[in-house]
Amino acid sequence: SLPFLWLPFPLRHTRDAPFRRRRARLCQAPGPWLGPLLLPGAMSEQTGLALPQTMDRSCWVCFATDEDDRTAEWVRPCRCRGSTKWVHQTCLQRWVDEKQRGNSTARVACPQCNAEYLIVFPKLDRLISKACPFAAAGIMVGSIYWTAVTYGAVTVMQVVGHKEGLDVMERADPLFLLIGLPTIPVMLILGKMIRWEDYVLRLWRKYSNKLQILNSIFPGIGCPVPRIPAEANPLADHVSATRILCGALVFPTIATIVGKLMFSSVNSNLQRTILGGIAFVAIKGAFKVYFKQQQYLRQAHRKILNYPEQEGA
């Protein structure tokens, strides 16, 4: 026999009699799975406990219900309804990991309704994600700084001499070394960026008529040109920027080698290196001025030919 059901409203004997009979039939009609269909809020006469109001939830990943694991955490991550509405938190986490494939910043959406999952991280992760760029920038700046310090120390020992350079750095103030040594590569790069050959070439082109000896050394400097060619910006080319950087860093080594080859009679390592650097810069500048002048003349005397007409056209 079916248990007595307590209804949350009184049954009237007047106009509500048809409704009462329909309500009673619904309460006693057996369901296909859950037995008698019970009203919300109904209580069992034997136990006195409230009967369940909804059906058991089912996970669309592992197909488990509340009866299988009552301690599992459930979540409704999307707009789905029905059997795909609920899913275990752990099951959905595994499914998201499979979709992201190691990229925690990738967005994941529901395969049914295409709603994007709202994934949040703890506040500590947010703090770390914000601090990581600054930490990476600090590490990079520190690496560049200590690389510049090491390069400056090696340059001092190379220019002055190994023993003399060590003695100079040991007697110097540590603060002066920490500030002075990194400025050596910076000053070399800034010095390399000064294009003194262009200024010298402009002066020679301007005053070459007064100095006839320049015409014999650099022919075509004082001659008039049909047009003035445009000159490109050397810093706009990344190859030129790389050449400036590499040339500035290897300049002390080249100056030392040239000084030993051309001024071997000089006893002082510093003087020999300075003379070698000056000689290298002067010789290289002379060749560069000559090359630029020839390129200038070729561009100034450039001509564009007529398009050749085809025979029989």
Image: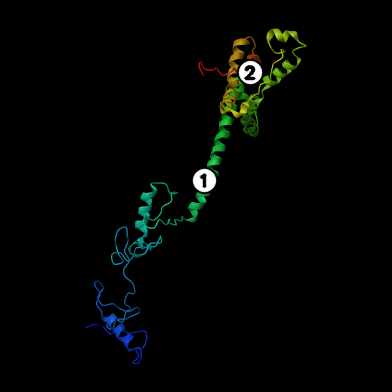
Q: Image check: 211 left or right of 68?
A: right
Q: Which mark is residue 122?
A: none
Circle 2 residue: 299
Q: Amino acid at mark 2?
A: Gln
Find residue 110 and report its horizontal and vertical position in percent: 39, 56
Q: Is residue 169 visible?
A: no
- Front: mark 2 or 1: 2
Q: Relative to residue 265, is residue 124 depicted above or below?
A: below
Assign a secondary structure to mark 2. helix
Q: Relative to residue 2, is residue 202 depicted above or below?
A: above
Q: Residue furthest left?
A: 1
Q: Residue at x 67, y 19 (%)?
A: 197
Q: Image check: 115 left or right of 52?
A: right
Q: Is residue 89 visible?
A: yes
Q: Which mark is residue 132?
A: 1
Q: Amino acid at mark 1?
A: Cys
